[in-house]
Amino acid sequence: MAHVPAVSETENGREPESENGSENGSGPGSGPGRESGAGSAAAARSPRTWAVIVAACAGQFLVVLDVSVVNVALPSMRADLGLSTIGLQWVLNAYSIAFAGFMLLGGRAADIFGRKRMFLAGLGVFTAASLAGGLAQEGWQLLAARGVQGLGAAVLAPATLTILTAAVPAGPARTRAIATWAAVGAGGGAAGGLVGGVLTDALSWRWVLLINVPAGALVLLAAALWLTESRAKKARRRLDLPGAVLVTGGLAVVAYGIVQTERAGWTAAATLVPLLGGLLLLAAFLLVEARTKQPLMPLGLFRVRAVSAANAGMMMTGSASFAMWFFMTVYAQNVLGYTPLQAGLALIPSSLSVVLGSKLAPLLMRRVGARHVAVLGAVVGSAGFGWQSMMTADGTFLRTILGPGILMMAGAGLAMTPLAALATASAAPGEAGLVSGLVNTSRTMGGAIGLAVLSTVAAARTSHGTGPGALTEGYALAFRTGAGLLLAAAVLMLFWLPRRSDT
């Protein structure tokens, strides 16, 4: 999936600064007039600066890659570790819930303790958890490793962009560097299916995780040598750890309660207890955020119409698009008989279409406005989900994977860009980074809850059947539900998003 650029909050809306001024000594204060401009340009072209850019982009690539790389390996994981259908979805949810729940905390920690320090810490945790997951002998060991992976990613991801912007002076060079960073992130999502398919077919599913170990070690060494420490000069000194723990735990328990409905139904204690417990944890999170002096998620932000509407829209569209990868992968392998490599290759056009949709969105936004583009994206995505819901057990690549997959993901790309733009454009200058992080968090959390809901819907239709026909009926109902969810998102955005078109 495409990731909206997330930046950590900086004081007064300023660019990240190092403890001693500009990261590379060639920022705006390095000299007057042409000398300053020449110094900035020279610094941007220096080998050390590009080494920093490569290290930051490599970290971002690994984080985004691991959102999607495990999808095509899921059937192999199930066969090897004896995972249930619920267990398979938690291979994805354990990562995404920890990632989303701790992302804002990771950004704040980078400002307080130093971006290089948190980059190294996050990448170290991520790499170690990848090793543990690749060597897992039991299903619970894999799920625990994926959760720790998500925690490492939440610490690592916010630091990658702030390191990059601190290393490259403001101007065209920084714009190019950020574009490179964004493209690498999108490329990580697009490459996940192919990389996972190649590794699973050629070696085993374990290598979709173990490949992070040599890659992570190499990036760790490069970062230790090339990065210079920096932090926000007046960063708040307190971390809202209780808030991060409460929101992550609440979401995890709610998701667990939802998937329990497949086995026990909605009225059973096994379902109601975790659902109520999760809601209580989320209520406690809101209470903590309302009372703490330095909240993880300032609730006052949601009084801004564009921020609240864009986050709701992002959560709803993310809940459908995240689940799409799971169901397309298991359909291709469990019903159509694709190998992991074939499944990865089959999903490449869909992966590229989300990038195309993201690039097309700004052009359309200038013509018809951000609100209409966001609505259009949800409608296009809904059409793709509706098309996919007509899948059959003997479906063809063109009819049941290529065409609907392109529509679904192009719609996601069209919707995400204007939603992020509307939210951040309406924020105060000092809160733009925080709002960007909130948008990312809403999308990822929505994806985790959406996967739990749609998987439960699919399981209810199959009635525990394992034949191609029964599985197809369940997957088709999940896609129909996703189509309805996206139509509801389109209506919500049409009436709630601001009507201005100057974003």
Image (spheres, helix red, strand yellow):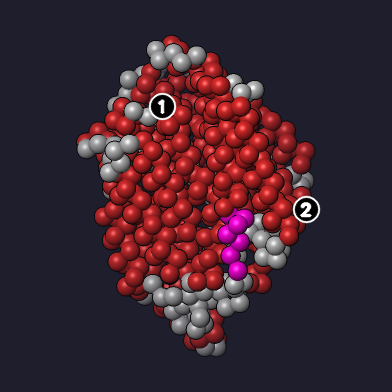
Using the image, tell me which numbered label, if any, was put on residue 130. Answer: none
Q: Position of residue 185 (x, y in %)?
A: 44, 51
Q: Position of residue 450 (x, y in %)?
A: 57, 34
Task: Work out which residue is located at the far left of the displayed protein and give it.
Answer: 202
Horizontal side, residue 283 vs residue 437: left or right: right
Tag 1 or tag 2, which sits nearer the N-term? 1
Name the kind of residue labelled 1 in the image. Ser
User: Residue 426, can we see it?
Assistant: no
- Disc 1 target residue: 84
Instruction: Tell me the magenta residue range.
Output: 238-244
Q: Residue at x 53, y 55 (%)?
A: 103
Q: CA distance from mark 2 to mark 1?
A: 42 Å
Using the image, tell me which numbered label, if any, was put on residue 303. Answer: 2
Query: Between residues 21 and 377, which one lies in front from this camera angle?
Result: 21
Task: Work out which residue is located at the far front of the displayed protein and give it.
Answer: 269
Horizontal side, residue 283 vs residue 62: left or right: right
Q: Residue at x 41, y 40 (%)?
A: 143
Residue 468 located within the stretch drawn in magenta: no
Q: Position of residue 382 (x, y in %)?
A: 60, 28
Q: Residue at x 52, y 21 (%)?
A: 263
Residue 240 located within the stretch drawn in magenta: yes
User: Residue 467, can we see it?
Assistant: yes
Task: Verify CB contact (< 8 Å) between mark 2 and mark 1.
Answer: no
